[in-house]
Image (tube, rainbow, N blue to C red):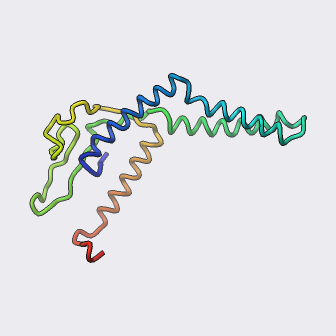
Amino acid sequence: MAVDSYLELFTTLFGWQWYGIIWDALTDTGIVYIPFVMILLTRWKDAARGGSFGNVHDIALRSIEIEFYVAVFVALIAGPPAVGLSATAMSYTPSPTLNDPTPATATPALPDSSYGSAGAFSGTPASVNVPVWWYAILSLSKGINHAIVTGMPDSVGIREV
């Protein structure tokens, strides 16, 4: 996955590492299940207020079932870290300049930047897990961003814009 800056090489990995820790804390304490309990309670309450006595159970059950399945689907694709993102798959290639027409591609192992030499960010995780939904969003947004930047003319100055 190509990133847009030297710093993003590290913040992406550290950010998703912290997300994994937070997700573990939420699931271990059971806080992640509170929205599902709230769905049950609010749908049951809404059905009891709005329907006649004979229809209350049917209305509540249908409403709970639909919203519960949607919530489970969203929770499965956007919650638990599932897709591996390896540090070796991440890279950044700076734009060419007159002084450096072929800049080296930076990776977390060899950043080759003002942030330091190899190993400057010791502690960078070698691999992190990302939720399926967010991995897709990251990949799509990076692809669109890089396509737009590639399509821009090289000689456009701020005065011309």
Q: Residue 50 occupies which quadrant of the picture?
A: top right
Which residue does the image show at 23% across and 39% down from the upper left?
Answer: 108
Can you give x and y, in whole percent of width and height, for residue 9 in the image?
27, 43
View extreme (bottom): residue: 160
**Looking at the picture, how far across and down is residue 89, in whole percent?**
28, 40
Q: Is residue 112 left or right of residue 78?
A: left
122 shown above or below 91: above
Which corner quadrant holds the N terminus? top left
| 149 on left or right of 29 | left
Residue occupying the point 47% across, 26% down: 25
Q: Is residue 79 left or right of residue 110?
A: right
- Percent from the top left, x then y, of residue 92? 24, 48
The residue drawn where x is 19% and y is 48% is: 105
Q: Where 136 falls versus 28 (above or below)?
A: below
Residue 81 appears at what percent x and percent y?
Answer: 44, 33
Q: Tally the numbered discs.
A: 0
In-front residue for pair 104/120: 120
Q: Residue at left 30%, top 67%? A: 152
